[in-house]
Image (cartoon, grey):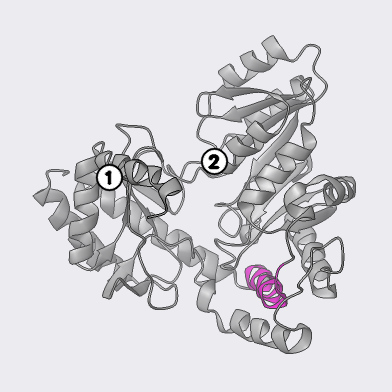
Amino acid sequence: MVESLKFLDAEIAALKEQNIFRPLRVLETPQQPVSVIDGKRVINLSSNNYLGLATHPKLIAAAKKAIDDFGVGTAAVRTIIGTQTIHQELEKKIARFKGTEASLVLQSGFTTNVGVVQSVLTSEEDLLVSDELNHASIIDGGRLSKAERFIYPHKDMKALAEILEKNSKGTRRRMIVTDGVFSMDGDVAPLPEIVEVAARYDAIVMVDDAHASGVMGPNGRGTPSHFGLTDKIPIQIGTLSKAIASIGGYVASTQQMRDYLIHKARPFLFSSSHPPSVTATCLAALEVLETDAPRIQRLWDNTKYFKSELKKLGFNTGNSETPITPIMIGDTQKALKMEALLFEEGVFALAITYPTVARGKERLRTIVSSEHTQENLKFALDKFREVGKTLGVI
């Protein structure tokens, strides 16, 4: 042990004492509905691979061709010599897909949220108002901004309006930020009401649509499209690492926003651009979304079936409206035990505990995909019933 790092022993011991020290699970196969994890073949209910695109032949072929055409990497940041024609092609395609004037791709969804919030809210005269269950990247972006920050109770529109009424006067810029689909509970933001409040106080609306892009709206265009509000939401954030099954994040907005962020967003300025294979994969994924509507319908059919059967068994699935379906447990030890027993029985569903969720809100989070078969889901449901009864959850 390096003497100067001995403090880590105590920190790790504290994590173990709080039952939040977790070894990394190791995936030994491609990301599929049935995967080998830590040497065991299991029904995989913890992946963001909503549409099964991680192994789609069209995406694999596009990645291989891009390596032949452009090489394995750019070895440069975008603002020096790291922008290839394929990067520009992807950004134009994202903008068309999301119904915006332009888009800009960054290295991850996390850095996109951080970069946009930090770059837009640059003065102590700015105001940021954020849903209490927003993603950690939005929280960190707010901390790095210079704005005064307020949190409103989850989806509480009255509280949101009261914060703006009380604090808007004398501010320079006001921004409301919300997830489109909330990653732990699987519920959907009330965008029509948020847009209405924003109009009253001349506030910018920014939606992080990480778990909605590829899932909600026509062809998976996201929650603004789902609600018919694309032209009312000036900043849409998306990820390329969930339904798109690759890596990266993007902001879809105006050409002026794109131009501004190229010069101001620090994650964009100081990180190398995506390898051509990654960019080509994303292009191919968007083509699949635009042409394979039955794939998205299968996702929703599986979601409806799985959620309905869990409720019939007596599980509490919270307020979920999407393929993210929590199974509420309310106790850390019981949640961890349920994950372990399910894994032994051939089902992987991750326990989510404090500090990711509040104490008393511990749960297992399940996510079905379009590629799970009825046989897969029936097997999983049988195991949930057995383990749930053993632990007294149902």
x 55%, y 37%: residue: 134
Magenta span of residues: 274-289
x 73%, y 55%: residue: 98
What secondary structure do most residues of the magenta stretch adopt? helix
Of all residues, the one furthest to the front in this rendering is 3
Secondary structure beneath label 2: helix
* Circle 2 or circle 1, nearest the eye: 1
x 70%, y 13%: residue: 167
Say whether residue 288 is left or right of residue 375.
right
Secondary structure beneath label 1: helix
Give the mark nearer the N terminus: 2 vs 1.
Answer: 1
Marks 2/1: CA distance? 22 Å
Residue 136 disc label:
2
Q: Is residue 191 above or below residue 314?
A: above
Residue 314 disc label:
none
Residue 16 disc label:
1
